[in-house]
């Protein structure tokens, strides 16, 4: 009577959400202070002050329909122009307002982009493990197939030989995510260069444009002066999907954009298809007040030093205890090797100490767990005893 | 290289948008005061004061993550509870928070509902002319077929005999919109009763649940004490799609909901499929700040008296000049009989007097034009001369 596929999607909550809900129930039993919830990537660092200031200024100085009215479907022109200028100043790019399409956040950016690019049901998009689990949902929803390249568990870069084998005449593109959720790793310059070379080679071999979809919600959340490159500088056919959810802590407001730079082959056609896909999925325009808010907050970020404190504390303590993980350069996740092969069982064992960590299988990388450290630092410190006890189970 | 269907959707702007853009160009040539733009349904009456007050109160009293953080996918519990209570007080219904799924506005509500209900490509949804043109896009996007019931141009109710003929074993449901865009007409109690009887009869005949999708963005924009009913009271299998775009003038903020009442057959499964469809289309949650804003503005509306002033002025003047139209009871549209058969040509002739009115063909009702009167009253008054001149062409 209803769509079986939609019903399934609606009834299977993601493992992350399940753990998050479990944490809330457990808190009611053992006390909030005794639950160490590292399950969800909901930023705890407040939005920068500019957000509040911008909202109040807009409310005080603009007419109701200027801030709450429809914008054009692709977004307010001044907003897109402002973002283009900001990007040009930051990355020395040559972008214009019309390269940007404002969206309701990263999930919308990806769904719209995939729908715009998918031509036939045989089309394939490649996803690199470990990956954000909803990528599978979004690719399927666009009517295409997801093909997974297994994780490089040594460095969490991309295994180029395996990627090469995954590309065939049906491949439409690849989705990458650096800084990465869940590994926290930032792709190296070598990775970007090798990736660009491979995609160019394969595009020629199959006489088929391969799109690089760069999902960049964590672009500004990086540590130790790590530089995040402007990806289209490496590879022309790059479409950037961006969101302000993490960089200025507005995940619930659903505001982001799709960038189709002019260097994309037939960029205007791709942009037009993006506009059509947005329309087709019911995205009339991105939320209007927050379009104007992000314009006033360009270049600002939440206080990343707070995440950095957590990062160092967690990485240092866990490695001291004997846990193995790659030191993250960005985002707010630590991807830790489970102390047994079965990451689901390992995560279950962690729950015995009210420690909520997400099994890696859901990210396409079994044998690992994701520890999301966008949490209160005091909670983080209190959790070390639980991590120690978990470690003790395997000695 | 890109989806042809999405490219087409992106390149064909709706006729309404075309006229709106033309108006802006023409204003630059002849002066803004000399262009009479009745093309678009963008509310000009400001949002009620409670919107600004609610935003400022939330900013002053809540922590950043409480107002800007992710809510659950179906929407904040307190918000849904508040809407349920408000509906129960208003309509004597028995709704609970879990009957509501918060969305990014009416377009999202419809796309999600249609996607949740569509099982196979033969599925059909019936649309009653005159209709909001994007219905065709949304039904197609859900993977189903739209079947149009021709307009009842006498009263703009529903021609039940034609509707009956349109129902077959593939019919999944019917979309209705009362108060109606573009006719301004409100369905009578008889229409609701007859419609319910017909749908019950046909559901039994085909042993197939027929859903009534009630698209209600104009529910509160009614005149002369007209009462809008609670549609599930007439027909159990009703899903209500709502938006705050028009009632409190927040069209750009993208905030609304889907209501699946318990009287819907297998209501829980339908609701679950709605959750899945939202996820599949990339709607992570409805904008969080505005979820909380609408909770604080329940029962409030923009100043409808201003629209009523325009309605009376326009209806009286136009009928005095000899134009024919049904007096609208709701929304902010007047649907006027064109003075020739060809409504496109009629609209083109109107442009000669800088009068922008939308041909009815796009709404599935050729021979008419839509005059959107959510405009400045002074502009409305200045436009009468142009309407007279247009009338003069046909004497």
Image (cartoon, coloured by chain):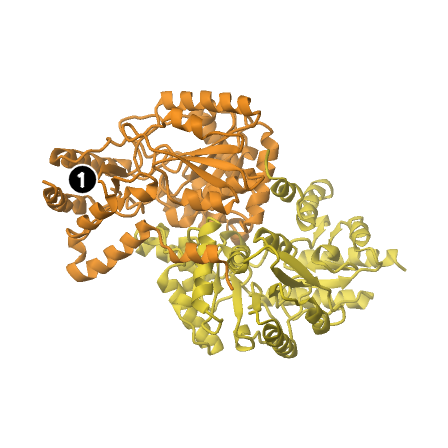
Chain colours: A orange, B yellow
Q: Which residue is mark 1?
A: A339
Relative to A196, A340 lies left or right = left
Q: Residue at x 72, y 73 (%)?
A: B161
Q: Is residue B225 above or below residue B151?
A: below
Q: Tell me where residue B176 appears, x and y as whole percent.
A: 61, 66
Residue under the image location 53 percent in, 56 percent down? B115
Outermost residue toward the right? Answer: B395
Q: Is residue A194 above or below residue A361?
A: above
Front one among A195 and B219: A195
How many numbered badges does the structure rendering display? 1
Determine the secondary structure under disc 1: loop
Left/right placement of residue B31 relative to residue B90 reads right
**Image location (x, y in percent) of residue A278:** 55, 45
Give the letter of the chain under mark 1.
A
For residue B387, which quarter of the picture?
A: bottom right
* Residue appearing at x 57%, y 69% in the figure: B208
Percent x, y of residue A176: 41, 33
Res. A186 visible in picture: yes
x then y, percent, for residue A232? 47, 26
Q: Is residue B250 visible?
A: no
Mark 1 surroundings: few (<14), some (14-19) or many (≥20) residues within 10 A: many
Judge by depth and name the residue closer to the eye, B290 or A152. Answer: A152
Locate the C terminus of chain A and report the quarter of the image it occupies. top left
């Amino acid at each position: 009577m209803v769509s079986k596929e939609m019903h399934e999607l609606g009834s299977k909550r993601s493992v992350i959400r399940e753990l998050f809900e479990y944490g809330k129930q457990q808190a009611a039993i053992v006390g909030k202070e005794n639950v160490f919830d590292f399950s969800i990537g909901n930023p705890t660092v407040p939005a920068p002050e500019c957000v509040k200031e911008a909202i109040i200024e807009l409310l005080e100085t603009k007419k109701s329909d200027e801030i709450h009215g429809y914008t054009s479907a692709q977004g307010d022109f001044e907003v897109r122009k402002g973002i283009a200028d900001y990007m040009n100043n930051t990355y020395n790019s040559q972008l214009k307002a019309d390269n940007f399409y404002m969206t309701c956040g990263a999930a919308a950016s990806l769904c719209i982009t995939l729908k715009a690019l998918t031509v036939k049901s045989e089309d394939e998009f490649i996803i690199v493990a470990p990956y954000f689990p909803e990528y599978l949902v979004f690719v399927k929803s666009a009517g295409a197939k997801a093909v997974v390249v297994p994780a490089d568990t040594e460095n969490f870069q991309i295994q180029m030989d395996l990627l090469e084998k995954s590309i065939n005449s049906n491949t439409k593109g690849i989705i990458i995510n650096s800084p990465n959720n869940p590994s926290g790793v930032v792709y190296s310059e070598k990775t970007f260069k090798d990736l660009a070379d491979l995609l160019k080679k394969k595009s020629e071999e199959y006489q088929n444009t391969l799109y690089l979809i760069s999902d960049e919600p964590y672009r500004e959340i990086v540590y130790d002066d790590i530089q995040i490159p402007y990806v289209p500088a490496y590879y022309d056919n790059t479409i950037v999907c961006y969101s302000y959810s993490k960089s200025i802590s507005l995940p619930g407001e659903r505001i982001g954009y799709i960038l189709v730079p002019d260097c994309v082959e037939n960029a205007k056609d791709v942009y037009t298809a993006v506009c059509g896909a947005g329309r087709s999925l019911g995205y009339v325009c991105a939320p209007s007040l927050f379009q104007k808010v992000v314009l006033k907050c360009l270049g600002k970020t939440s206080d990343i030093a707070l995440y950095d404190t957590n990062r160092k504390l967690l990485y240092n303590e866990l490695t001291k205890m004997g846990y193995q993980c790659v030191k993250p350069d960005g985002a707010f996740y630590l991807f830790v090797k489970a102390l047994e092969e079965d990451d689901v069982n390992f995560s279950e064992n962690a729950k015995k100490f009210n420690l909520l960590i997400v099994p890696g299988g859901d990210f396409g990388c079994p044998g690992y767990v994701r520890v999301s450290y966008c949490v209160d630092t005091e909670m983080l410190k209190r959790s070390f005893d639980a991590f120690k006890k978990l470690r003790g189970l395997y000695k």
